[in-house]
Amino acid sequence: EPEVTQTPSHQVTQMGQEVILRCVPISNHLYFYWYRQILGQKVEFLVSFYNNEISEKSEIFDDQFSVERPDGSNFTLKIRSTKLEDSAMYFCASKGGGNQPQHFGDGTRLSIL
Amino acid sequence: AQKITQTQPGMFVQEKEAVTLDCTYDTSDQSYGLFWYKQPSSGEMIFLIYQGSYDEQNATEGRYSLNFQKARKSANLVISASQLGDSAMYFCAMREVQGTGRRALTFGSGTRLQVQP
């Protein structure tokens, strides 16, 4: 069964550094998302992406964040200058049309030191 | 106001018994979708079951069923014949289609289920 893949599984970065989290969505999916989950808390929406542009973003997704779909397969989340509070599990998800469910990747655990 | 409320932070169930995980939601939209996801200790998010607001029948997927009561705005997950591998965190989520047009999911705070042998 096709799946969403995320790399790396764990990223450790110094505060203030840039980090790029990578995702390969399911190939025929149209909608792409990033979520984050701070340890022990609920999953929070960051941004959705459709038709090569951001369709919606949450208040968490400030100017430090950006997303890109540089080619037909990858979908990346960049954090320009990481803060301690960016430490979380970051999930990529993708969805086909209609009422299809979002399928999540296994997540990238980001640790900011 | 909470969009998705899961009032049970933790639940225990004996192996082979059924368990119900509660979820209530709040929306003014007429069209929306309700989802349940399982998150094992390894961290991945696994889709379990979906219920559309216009679906007249409760959704079922194997041992999972969704007890959808639209008037009460509840979408409880029922797991029948619990197995040890069902021990995990379970999240209820909603996708609202109208209003902001947002298609992202709003998650509840989760219920940690522990299946005891």
Image: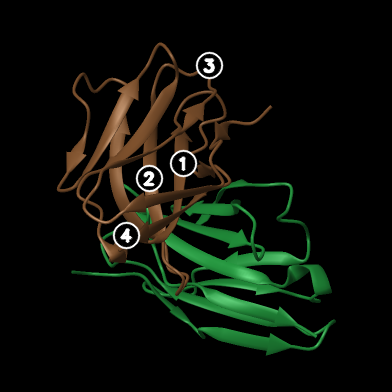
Chain colours: A green, B brown
On screen, residue A88 above or below A11: above
Dot 3 or dot 2: first in sequence order is 3
The mark total stands at: 4
Which residue lies under the disc numbered 3? B28
Both labels 3 and 2 in a single chain: yes
Both labels 4 and 3 in a single chain: yes
Name the chain under label 3.
Answer: B
Q: Could you tell me residue B82's position as x and y percent?
A: 25, 53
User: Is B76 situated left or right of A55 in this image?
Assistant: left
Which residue lies under the disc numbered 1? B93
Cβ–Cβ under 8 Å for marks 1 and 2: yes
Residue at 72% across, 73% down = A87
Q: Depth check: A29 or B8 in front?
A: B8
Q: Secondary structure at mark 3?
A: loop
Residue at 18% across, 47% down = B63
Both labels 1 and 2 in a single chain: yes
